Image (spheres, rainbow, N blue to C red):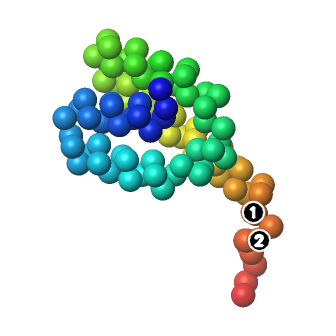
Amino acid sequence: MGNRRFHHLVATASANQELAAELIRVHDRLARFMVMRHAGATQPHTHARIQEALRAHDVAAARQAMLQEINETRDVLLDRVMQEEGSYWALGTHA
């Protein structure tokens, strides 16, 4: 199952339709970054942890697994962007 579909199903199961709709918009905006991250390699493991926590009705573990996925994605993307585009940024210089 794809990342977008997985997270949409989780949001839909929460019965929060606004969350589900916003999540679709966020995933659409982040699609190219997910390709940059090579997210497909780690998603099955991450999604399995989230599913386990949800099946066990363990809110804290589900929250932690989702936050870990978000934080790992952020870190990988920032590192990648800095490696590929960092030379274009005038960080630490005064204009």
Relative side of 61 to 87, left or right: left
Q: Residues within 10 Å of mark 2 (few under 14, many from 20)?
A: few
Front one among 73 and 36? 36
Residue 45, x across and y down, in percent: 55, 20
Q: Mark 1 highlights which residue?
A: 85
Mark 1 and mark 2 residues within 8 Å of each other at the beta carbon: yes
Query: At label 2, which amino acid type do we have?
Result: Tyr
Q: Residue furthest top?
A: 56
Residue 42, x across and y down, in percent: 61, 27
Q: Quadrant of residue 54?
A: top left
Q: Mark 2 highlights which residue?
A: 88
Rendered position, 57 above or below 16: above
Q: Secondary structure at mark 2?
A: helix
- Identified at 76% across, 71% down, the residue is 88
Query: At label 1, which amino acid type do we have?
Result: Glu
- Identified at 54% across, 22% down, the residue is 44
Q: Residue furthest left?
A: 15
Q: Quadrant of residue 38?
A: top right
